[in-house]
Amino acid sequence: MKIGIMGGTFDPIHNGHLSIARAAFGQFGLDRIWFLPNGNPPHKALADIGSSIEDRLKMVSLAITGHTGFRLEMYEARRKSISCSYETMEHFTKLYPDDEFYFIIGADSLFTIEKWVHPERLFPTCTILAAFRDEADTKEEMEQQMNYLKEKYQARSALLISPVIQISSSELRKRIREGKSIQGLVPDKVAEYIKKECLYELQNQ
């Protein structure tokens, strides 16, 4: 099978995440996309994450319900130690040697991926799909970066054309603290869960 890996803190998951996942699913003929919430990310202090891993798992589960081929993957969420992408992907490729993995990242991450822990061990495990919004200058820069990574690391990568959805999880948390609506920015079931559990409100910060 061809499996896409969509990692992140998902704090909260939003329509931008789902849009990129759907684009990857269609453009690269993927059989599955695994949403991989990170319980203990190396780049972010736990105190900076606005909701518990249990809440984030529930929101991802609600967000992907009904999407054929999307699944919640618990591997990193179950780990007590810090989860690094290369370790996760080495684990998956060892466990599923007959499957082909595609690691989905944002455009910014393509240019900072060398700062990740052991990127040279990540690249052999997967094809990098870098989300690209249709802007000519950005496309040229991204192609140059992909060529550089190919020459230096023999990295396999491709551009993932994704719709422009100008929203981030941090902006959503800010809107909630300010009492503003997030309707239309997250799946309805996620919006309902956030409201029901009073997530990201000032008293929870």
Image (cartoon, rainbow, N blue to C red):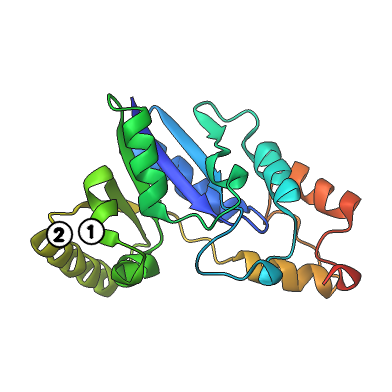
Q: Residue 186, how many percent across, how many down?
A: 68, 52
Q: Which residue is mark 2?
A: 153
**Dot 2 lies on which element?**
helix
Q: Which residue is mark 1?
A: 120
In screen coordinates, is 19 left or right of 23?
right
Q: Residue 29: tell me if it is visible.
A: no
Quadrant of residue 180 in the image? bottom right
Q: Residue 92: tell me if it is visible.
A: yes
Quadrant of residue 175 in the image? bottom right
Q: In the orientation shown, which residue stands out farthest toward the left?
A: 151
Q: Mark 1 packing: few (<14 Cα in 10 Å), some, or many (20+)?
A: some
| Quadrant of the image containing the C terminus | bottom right
- Residue shown at the point (78%, 51%) measured from the top left: 191
Q: Marks 1 and 2, how far apart in space? A: 6 Å
Three-letter residue code for mark 1: Glu
In screen coordinates, is 128 left or right of 169?
left
Instruction: Establish if 115 lies above or below 129.
Output: below
Q: Residue 118, how many percent across, how many down?
A: 30, 61
Q: Are marks 1 and 2 in contact (CB under 8 Å)?
A: yes
Total tally of numbered discs in the picture: 2
